[in-house]
Image (cartoon, grey):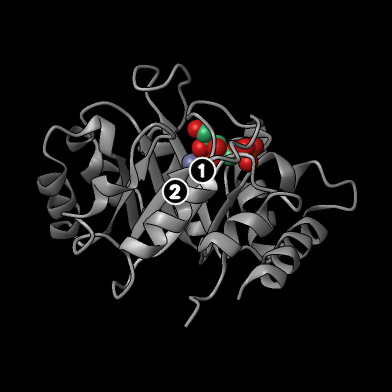
Amino acid sequence: MARPLSIAPSVLPVDFSRLGDEIMALEKAGVDLIHWDVMDGVFVPNLTFGPDVIASTRPLVDLEFEAHLMVVEPDRLVERYVEAGCSTVLVHAEACDHLHRTLTYIADLGATPGVALNPHTPAEVIRNVRDLVGVVLVMTVNPGFGGQSYIETMESKVVEVTSLLDGYDCAVEVDGGIGPTTVGAVVAAGADRLVSGSALFRDDKGLEHAVADLRAHAEAAQA
Ligand code: DX5
Ligand code: ZN
């Protein structure tokens, strides 16, 4: 039984001078949750949202917030992002010396733990933590920036992750280069939570059309 599809817009492409309005516009456009790409300038070259920035927008919408922590030593920061209002916190397997402990810590804080895999990281990495996670994120670009080219070879990894998660209550998420021309392949491979940034904001018919169009392409591909 296929899981319901979720559209999770990345906040990276928004006009930061109007962040609150942009988050409310995303809710109005019909997205399912908000995906905050948190970057520390060390794990990835870019630097983005601190917890206070996220917390400032929390009261504006009813949507779930998920934090994609592209940071080194995430244990230092997890609690701050949960307190900021993120109910799902994703850490990179590559950034954790003790991934099992970090995911358990996120759950102990009352949030849903998630693990993100860079393109070079094998799906097999999730085998011994799949009982702990509510989301596995397969990066379909190398993390750090929006607007990069989709990596087609990740489709087979989405198939592998989906197979490893058979029988587990866990979303299969993809992030990077996801738009109307790529979403069908990843959904057919098993993805059900779709992070999209630039594709949503470059639709000249507006955000509402972009969200509906992405969802329509995804639904058409779901088995
Ligand atoms: C990379 C970021 C991006 C972003 C989506 O670190 O995680 O993948 O969310 O960017 P687009 O949809 O513009 O590729
Ligand atoms: Zn992300």
User: Label 2: how many residues lie within 10 Å, few (<14), some (14-19) or many (20+)?
Assistant: many
Callout 1: helix, strand or loop?
A: helix
Q: Amino acid at mark 2?
A: Lys
**Dot label at residue 216:** none
Left of 91 or right of it: where is 107? left
Q: Quadrant of residue 32?
A: bottom right
Judging by the rendered image, the residue that carries numbered circle 1 is 154
Whether ligand 1 has any atom under 8 Å from the Cβ at mark 2 is answered as no
Whether ligand 1 has any atom under 8 Å from the Cβ at mark 1 is answered as no
- In the rendered image, residue 156, in percent from the top left (x then y), is placed at 49, 49
Q: Residue at x 41, y 49 (%)?
A: 137
- In the rendered image, residue 144, in percent from the top left (x then y), is placed at 49, 26
Foreground pick, 124 / 150: 124
Q: Residue at x 80, y 41 (%)?
A: 202
> Pointer 2 and pointer 1: residues touching (CB < 8 Å)?
yes
Q: Amino acid at mark 1?
A: Met
- In the rendered image, residue 21, in percent from the top left (x then y), is placed at 66, 48
Q: Residue at x 9, y 47 (%)?
A: 101
Foreground pick, 201 / 86: 201
Q: CA distance from mark 2 to mark 1?
A: 5 Å
Q: Quadrant of residue 194?
A: bottom right
**Residue 7 visible in this rendered orientation of the protein:** no
Judging by the rendered image, the residue that carries numbered circle 2 is 157
Q: Residue at x 35, y 38 (%)?
A: 69
Looking at the picture, does residue 101 appear above or below residue 216?
above
